[in-house]
Amino acid sequence: MREKALTILNALGVTGAGSDPLFDFIVGTVTQALLNLTNQSSLPEGLINMAAYRVAGQYLAVLKGSGKLDLASVDLDAAVKQIQEGDTNVSFAIGAGSSTPEQRLDGLISAMISCGEREINRFRKLVW
């Protein structure tokens, strides 16, 4: 999952996350949160990709919030604008009207952090 999250960040133009201790902390935090939500002892295979998106989104959010994210280095030309889970509808933010690059980045971060909310329940185990 760690490598998949790094691949996502590299595709967006964010480099150096692999050597950042904060990145490893976020990987652990997201993993533990998903384990707690699913009552599992290990992360199910079906949640790996979703967890990678969440890690990448939270890493971007922390970098942006701390002022360490250079908006010019992030490739937002094909950033996701909207994701609909029902019949799989993905809209890209290419030519998104009056949206600023920062607004598009915020939308991308939000979509990544909340990726797969409904899918988590599929992997839950009951605990007595």
Image (cartoon, rainbow, N blue to C red):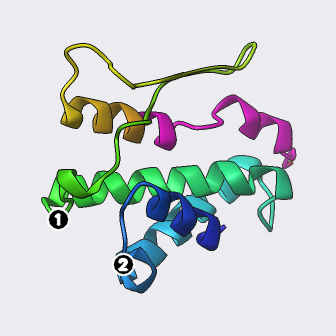
Q: Residue at x 19, y 15 (%)?
A: 98
Tell me if residue 118 is in the magenta stretch.
yes
- Determine which of the numbered discs, if any, sits on residue 16 in the image: 2
Real-space CA distance between mark 1 and mark 2, rounded to the nearest whole angstrom = 12 Å
Residue 35: x percent and y percent?
Answer: 70, 58
Q: Amino acid at mark 1?
A: Lys
Residue 28: x percent and y percent?
Answer: 54, 71
Q: Secondary structure at mark 1?
A: loop
Q: Residue at x 36, y 37 (%)?
A: 77
Relative depth, front residue between 53 and 43: 53
- Determine which of the numbered discs, if any, sits on residue 68 in the image: 1
Tell me where the magenta segment starts and ends, as one range: 110-127
Q: Is residue 72 left or right of residue 21?
A: left
Relative depth, front residue between 69 and 79: 79
Query: Looking at the image, is mark 1 or mark 2 nearer the viewer?
Result: 2
Q: Amino acid at mark 2?
A: Gly
Q: Is residue 53 left or right of residue 58?
A: right
Relative depth, front residue between 3 and 43: 3
User: Residue 93 occupies which quadrant of the picture?
Assistant: top left
Residue 30: x percent and y percent?
Answer: 55, 59
Q: Is residue 43 above or below residue 103?
A: below
